[in-house]
Image (spheres, grey):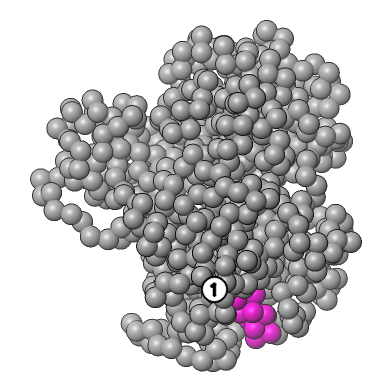
Amino acid sequence: MKTVVCPYCGFGCKLLVDPQTLIIKPYRGEPNRGKLCPKGLYAMEFALSKNRVKRPLKRNRSALKPIPWGQAIEEVSHKLLEIREFYGPDAVAFISSSKISNEENYLLQKIARLFGTNNIDNCARICHEASVHALKTTIGTGTQTNPYEDIENFGAILIWGYNPAGTHPVVIDYIKKAKKRGAKIIVVDVRETITMNLADYKFVIKPGTDIVLANAMMNVIIREELYNEEFIKNRTTGFSEVRMATMKYTPEYAEKVTGVPATLIQKTAREFALAGSGAIMWGMGVTQHVSGVENVLAIIDIALLLGYIGNRGGLYPMRGQNNVQGAAYMGALSEFLPGYIPLEDEKFRKRVASLWGVENIPIERGLYLTEVWDAIERDDIKALYIVGENPAVSEANFGRVRKALRKLDLLIVQDLFITKTAQYAHYILPASAFCEKEGSYMNSERRIQWSEKILEPLNDSKPDWKILIMLGKGLGLPGFEYSSVEEITKEYFSLFPELEERDIDALKSDDGVFLPKKRLHTWEFATPNGKARFVAVEQISPWENVDEEYPFILTTVRLMPNYNTGEMTSRSPSLSKLMKEPKIMINEEDAKKLNIVDNDFVEIETKRGKIRMKVKTGKVPKGLLVVPFHSKVNKITNNALNKAGTPEFKFSTARIKKLKNQKPILGNNQ
């Protein structure tokens, strides 16, 4: 049996694969402890798809024609260098991937910076970058603070804007064990979720009111003196501002705004405070708002009030893709070098430059992923190199993204399939699947794990790291003489003091390595003064307001058998059997007023356009429309950004009507 890291969610399950039969069994050790969800169980299937890109392709007018690798790399490199010569290095942008390895993300950001630009970003920007900004501001590190194993030992678990039963099914086992040991489970969401079946207390709040609820909980904790006075005094600053700011957010006021009864807010705040220890877990229901950074700040404030950090608690921003944490940690972000070190940190920047054999690397922040599309419209970006991402479907208001992709002088897509994004490409470079290469991945808890090679690369596809070495050489960049993936691992290890002396073989033989360590902030915080910083936040309204013209709120959710834009799961026959046609969920009373019944075709319209889908009535509050984001919904989602550059996927004002013509509309992501 060989061991690979599951290519789906950020939980980081390990899979045991029989190289002969390709049958998958769960790994018995950490983190999945013998558990798997259906996506993990059938993870090999998409890699065996007949739809894989088999050789490099070049666009010749409207057709894509196969070309040799040597020609592809030579032409791509020549055109990128030509654009740099005419327009400067910042006329090129690179989009890295949350589904490729640490080594591959490290190489792509190295290419971008040696090429002369910090225009390197990844899809962390549209999921948890708000968490990174808030965590770095308050406690100094932009990551999950504790391992999963701690969850089952805490006295309470607060799950906010996150449905682990659908998103990270294996983590539910940890939550169930905690509940069995007496932990109180509190779940906050805008609709009834499967996870709420575990809850002792459940809050169904009005969309966009998270800050009011958090501040009201703090109001109770402070007013009733349930906070951890010793922890606040010795390990934090800024408490007085939070105390002052939350005074007006009484439970009674919060009830009017959030829809949650004041008595429930009081009772739950007390329970969470008196539990003695606690985890706060959150997802994109918190971050994908214009108030995303402030939402996370408010959640962190609750933890700091109670001292639920280190051994007594943990902050868990649950990541959505198998290496989104690794992509960010390896420096595939436009404002950070590896390790989330800011570009302006001269000492570290010079250290990286020295390792790469150059005098310096660019210091100006590059474009966020979500800024790239406007930059193309302005003619600031002429070329885009995309690895393993599908922004033509995953971005909010994707119509403008597709328009931008059409405008580019040069679009290179490195991927497994001809995705919606690849359909606009001038060159498509065929990458190998996760099981056709070796490398390391970092899960949500910062555990680095080694993934073995099971199969030879399909046809003429190549591992991403080999393609990127060829590109680096083609661009004439220094330091691309690697002969194995382990040499790249060793290089990124050398950037982190915690890994500098670690043996890569140890990474291959045990349950992985934590970076920087398993449990953060047990004694001091990673801030200049070693103390955490409270940040008081006020309610921030969503970017759009419900009115007579657009009386509904549209929000997006994840379904368990599906994954992101569907390129992988839709090519898995076993998962396809589990999938149901994506439908828009609506409240029963709202449906009745509109003369809509289950399976009717409806048209949903926002200020960005219209889509048509079947409808399903269900347990959603009045005025709310819930759509799986694995569908075509991002055509109409809200691209207003928060300060971390994340769009407001979770709040778009909308209207809905029943279609007279009830014929199906073909194409899921059209």
Please provide percent x and percent y for residue 352: 81, 66
Q: Was residue 398 drawn as part of the magenta stretch in this picture?
A: no
Determine the residue positioned at 41% across, 68% down: 419
* Dot 1: element: loop
Please provide percent x and percent y for residue 559: 41, 46
Q: Main secondary structure of the magenta part?
A: helix
Badge 1: how crowded within 10 Å, few (<14), some, or many (20+)? Answer: few
Residue underneath mark 1: 20
Above or below, comparing residue 624 to residue 60 in the picture: above
Determine the residue positioned at 45% across, 66% down: 46
Determine the residue positioned at 52% across, 43% down: 169
**Which amino acid type corresponds to the residue marked 1 in the rendered image?**
Gln
Q: Nearer the viewer, residue 315 or 41?
A: 41
In the picture, which quadrant includes the C terminus?
bottom left
On the picture, is 51 further left or further right than 41?
Answer: left
Q: Where, by quadrant of the figure, is residue 239 drawn? A: top right
Above or below, comparing residue 286 to residue 359 in the picture: above
Q: Nearer the viewer, residue 378 or 1?
A: 1
Please provide percent x and percent y for residue 25: 56, 57
Q: Where, by quadrant of the figure, is residue 597 drawn? A: top left
Residue 395, visible in the rendered structure: no
Q: Which residues are magenta?
A: 463-474
Residue 454, visible in the rendered structure: yes
In the picture, which quadrant includes the N terminus?
bottom right
Q: Was residue 467 drawn as part of the magenta stretch in this picture?
A: yes
Q: Nearer the viewer, residue 522 or 480?
A: 522
On the picture, is 39 further left or further right than 632?
Answer: right
Q: Nearer the viewer, residue 328 or 35?
A: 35
On the picture, is 510 further left or further right than 22?
Answer: right
Please provide percent x and percent y for residue 528: 85, 40
Determine the residue positioned at 71% across, 24% down: 277
